[in-house]
Amino acid sequence: MTDEQTRTSLVRALSGAVRGEVEFDATARALMTMDASNYRRVPLGVVAPRDADDIAATLAVCRAHEVPVVPRGGGTSIAGQATGTGVVLDLTRHLRSIVELDAGARKAVVQPGVILDDLRRAAAPHGLTFGPDPSTHSRCTLGGMIGNNSCGSHSVAWGTTADNVEALTVARYGGDTLRLGRGRWDGAPAGLRELADSHLALLRTGFPELPRRMSGYALDALLPERGPDLARAFCGSEGTLGVVTEATVRLVEAPEARALAVLGYADESAAAEAAPGLLPYCPLTVEGMAADLVREPAGLPRGGAWLFVETGGATPAEARARAEQILRAADAVGATVVTDPAGQRALWRIREDASGTATRMPDGSEAWPGWEDCAVPPARLGPYLREFRALLTAHGLRGTPYGHFGDGCIHVRIDFDLLSGDGVARFRRFSEEMATLVVAHGGSLSGEHGDGQARAELLPRMYGDELVALFGRFKDLWDPDGGMNPGMLARPARLDENLRFDVLPRRPVDVTFGYPHDDGDFSAAVRRCVGVAKCRTSQPSGAGVMCPSFRATGEEEHSTRGRARLLHEMLAGEVITDGWRSKEVRDALDLCLSCKGCRSDCPVGVDMATYKAEFLHHHYRRRLRPAAHYVMGRLPGWLRLAAPFAPVLNALARIRPLAALAKRLAGVAAERTIPVLAGETFTRWAAKRRRRGPVLLSGDRVVAVWPDTFTDHLSPEVGRAAVRVLEAAGRTAVHPGRGVCCGLTYVSTGQLDKARRVMRRTLDRMGPSLGDPLVVLEPSCAATLRTDLPELLPDDPRAAELASSVRTLAQYLEEYAPDWQPPRLDRPVAGQTHCHQHAVLGDAAERRLRERAGLEGELAGGCCGLAGNFGFERGHWGVSVACAEEQLLPSVRSAEAGTDILADGFSCRTQLAQLAGVRSRHLAELLAEGLKGTDTHPI
C-alpha cells in the first residue's frame, strides 16, 4: 500500500475502534509536533482516548498497522520524549478523573490525564497533598510525571514521583494490560525476572547512589532487596514501555503552616556548598537560583544567589521558628523569613517562572534546554558548578543555573546557536564534554525531566556499554515490536537530529510590526514559545489573565502555546502549507481575545495579540474581510459620522427587527445589544466648556486628556469626571483636538496599513504637545499607544515620544500631583482590572489611589470576555460569556449590598451591563462623585 492508503486504513480502523477523537488533520498534527524541548517531529495523527479501553484499542490498531505510539501528557517535556512520528495519544482531554481518594489510607487512584493541581486541590481538605511538585504543577499530568519521574522543589522532603507511586495499570503496544505493584513479580512481562536474576551484580554496582538519578531505566528497582518494585521500574520510562491507564499514588500530610527562609550568598557555588548543611534540619525545600535569573530584586535579601528554604509546622509560630533556626545555621550574606502567604507566593513565582525566564539572557538573546536538569551528589554541587561555569566559558556559552540545590539537581538554559551548522556542532561538542563532567562528579545526566533525545545518546558515558545494552533488552521484553516511543532511551536518536529550528526560514519574514525585542524577526518572535505551557492552566492565577480562551474551551489550539505552534508550522510550511492564507491558523486565532495577557503572564513574553494582528493583516490582504472588520474594525470613523444623528440612531436601535438586521449585516452576535450613542460627545462638551472661559484653579499646570473613541462617543461621563478630578488636583485639563485616534480597532482586526495611516495622522495633529503628559482613560487605548504605536512605527521617533507620555489617571495623579488628597469614599468596591491594564500598564498606581480614597476590596483578574470587538462578533458569544463567568461575574454577584462596581474599560462595563444588568463605573467617576463643592461647569 502507498503511504496515503496506509494512513486512510489506519484512520478508518481507529475511528471504528475508539470512542474518543481521531484527528489526522493539519491542525491536530501541527499542535503535537513539539514539546518544551529543542526537538520537533511530525506525527501521523492524534487520538484522544476516552478511557482505558480506548487506549488499549489504539495500541492494538497501531500495532496491526506497524505505526508507533507516543503517549503525551501536558506536553512540557524538555528532552523531546513527547514528540514522535506515529500516533500521539493525547491523555489530557478526557482521562482526568480522580477515581478514588482514600484519606485514611493516604492514597489516591487517578487516571493519567489528571492535572497535579487538581489532585492537590482534592486532597487539601483532608490535610494531604501529593509530594512531588514540578514548577509546571498547574498543567502537568500525573501520567506525564510518572513517565518522566518528575520531582519538584519538595523532593528533599517527599521524594520523586517513583517514591510516591504504589501501583500502576499499564497497556502495552498491542493492547494487553498489566498490573504493576511492589514486592511481587506478578504482572511482569515474560522473561523480566530472569533478566534481572542473571545480572544482579551489574544491577547492584552499575547505578550511582544519589537522590536525583533519573537517567536510563530504573533496573535496580528489580533487585530482590528492593522489592522487586515493578511500578518503580516503570516510572521514568518516558512512554517507551507502555501507557499508564491508571495509577495508585501515595499522599503525604501537608503542614498546617509554612514559612520561607530566603538566604543570600555571594554566588551560586557558595549557595550550593551551603545547601547540604541545611538538610539535617529537615526542610521541605532547598531551592537555589542565581542573580542573573532575577530581572527585579522583588524583595530578595542581599546576595548574588539565593536559597529558598521552606519549613513547615503545626502552627505559623512553629514554622517560623524552624525557618529562623535555619537562618542561624546558615552562613549567608543576607537573609529573611517570609511567613505571609502572599509574600511567599510572590517569591515562589520567581522560582517557578524560571523555566521560562531562563530562556532569555539579560540582553534578550535566546537560550535553550539540552542540559536542563543533570544532577550530582549534593556534596559535590559547589565544585561541579564552578567547573560547569568554566566549561561554558571555554565554549563561549552563557547559562543561568537554578534548581534543586538540596538534591544536587541543576536546571540551566544555555544560549546555544541551534540555527547554524557551526552552532549545532558546538552544541554537540559541549554536550559530550558536559556528560563527561557530570559523570566525573558521580552524577546523572538527567536529574528530573528524563533523557529523551537530548541525553540518551550519551548514556554509555554514564553507565557503560554493558548496562546500556541491558536497557535495550529490558525495553524489548516490554515492547518486542518496538512501537512505543521509538528513538528514546533504548537505541536513541542522535542528540543533534530533529531540531525544531531546522525547518524555519533562514531569512527574516516580511512583516509590519517592528518586533523590537526580537530584532525585527517574526520567526524569532514565534520561537519565544518554548512550550512550558503556563497558558494551559485550567484555573486562573490570581490577578493573571493568560489564557482566557483556553480556559473557556480546554482546547490546545486555543492556548497561547497552541497558536504559537501553529504559527511555527506555518513558517515551516510542511504540515501547514498555505502560509499566511492558512485556515488552520486563522481558525485558531479567531478565538484569541487579543487580551494581551500573554505579553505579561507568559514567562517568555509571547505576545499573541500582536501575532494575531500581524497574521490577519497578511491573511486578508487584497481579500474580502469579515463584515465585523469593516464595521467594528473601523468603529472610530463610523462613530464620528453617526455622532450628529445619535438620538435618531438610538431610537432605531430600539426597534428589534431593525436592530436584528443591523447586527446581521455588521457581523454582530444576535445576543448582543447595540450600545447607546452619547447625545453629546466628550470632545463637544469639552469644546463648549472651553468657550465659556477658563476655569479658575489653584495651579496652572495643563494636562491633555485623550479623547478615545469609547470615552468620546459612548461614555463621555467618564471624560467629564476625569476633568473634574484633574481640576480638583490643580490641573487644567484639555484635549489634544479632534481626529486623533490610537488605531486600536484597526490593529485588533489586522488592518495594519490603515492603523499606521491613522497613527501618523495622529502624530501630525499632536504637533508641539508631543511628549507632554497624556492621560488616557480607556486602558485598551492606553496600551495601544504605549506598545502598538511604537512597534508599528519603529522608524518614527515621535511614536516612541508619544508612547512614553501615556499615563492612566492614577499614574498621572501619583506622578504629577503627589500631594493631592483624593476624597475619602470609605466603601467597598468590586469589579475587574482591565486585561490590557494588567498586561501593559500595570495597576499599582490604581491600587494605591483606591487605598487613599478608602475604596476597599480587590478587583478580579482575568478578562471580561468582551475584549473590544471580540465579544460582539458573531460566533464568539459562548466564549465571551464563559470568560466573564470565570472571574468577573462571580466577583460582582458575591459583592455585598452597597458595593460599588469598578471597571475602567468600556468593554468591561458593557459586558457587566449586558450579562448581569449591573452598572459599573470608571474610577474617575467614583472620585468625581466624592469631590466637595460644585463645579462652575457641571459634569
Image (tube, rainbow, N blue to C red):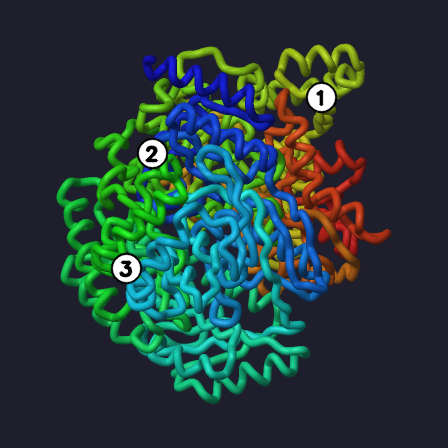
From the top left corner, tell me how far across and down residue 820 is, in percent: 63, 63
> Is residue 294 placed above or below 756 in the rendered structure?
below
- The disc, 1 or 2, on the residue closer to the chain's N-terminal end is 2
Residue 736 seen anywhere in this rendered image of the structure:
no
10 Å neighbourhood of mark 2: few (<14), some, or many (≥20)?
many
Q: Nearer the viewer, residue 482 or 99?
A: 482
Considering only order in the chain, which callout, 2 or 3, is on the residue closer to the N terminus? 2
Residue ID at (54%, 52%): 842
Which one is closest to the eye, mark 1 or mark 2? 2
Q: Earlier in the sequence, mark 1 or mark 3?
A: 3
Count of numbered tags: 3
Residue 36, position in %: x, y? 39, 45
Q: Secondary structure at mark 3?
A: loop
Would you name the residue on which mark 3 appears?
A: 399
- Give the residue type that dot 3 points to: Gly
Relative to 325, say whether 495 is above or below.
Answer: above
The residue that appears at 38% across and 44% down in the rendered structure is 477
SS state under label 1: helix
Pick the quarter of the image with the C terminus.
top right
The residue that label 1 is drawn on is 646
Circle 3 Cα neighbour tier, 10 Å, few/some/many (<14 / 14–19 / ≥20): many
Label 1 Cα crowd, 10 Å radius (few <14 / some 14-19 / many 20+): some
Residue annotated with mark 2:
41
> Which x, y percent locates residue 401?
33, 64
* Mark number displayed over residue 608: none
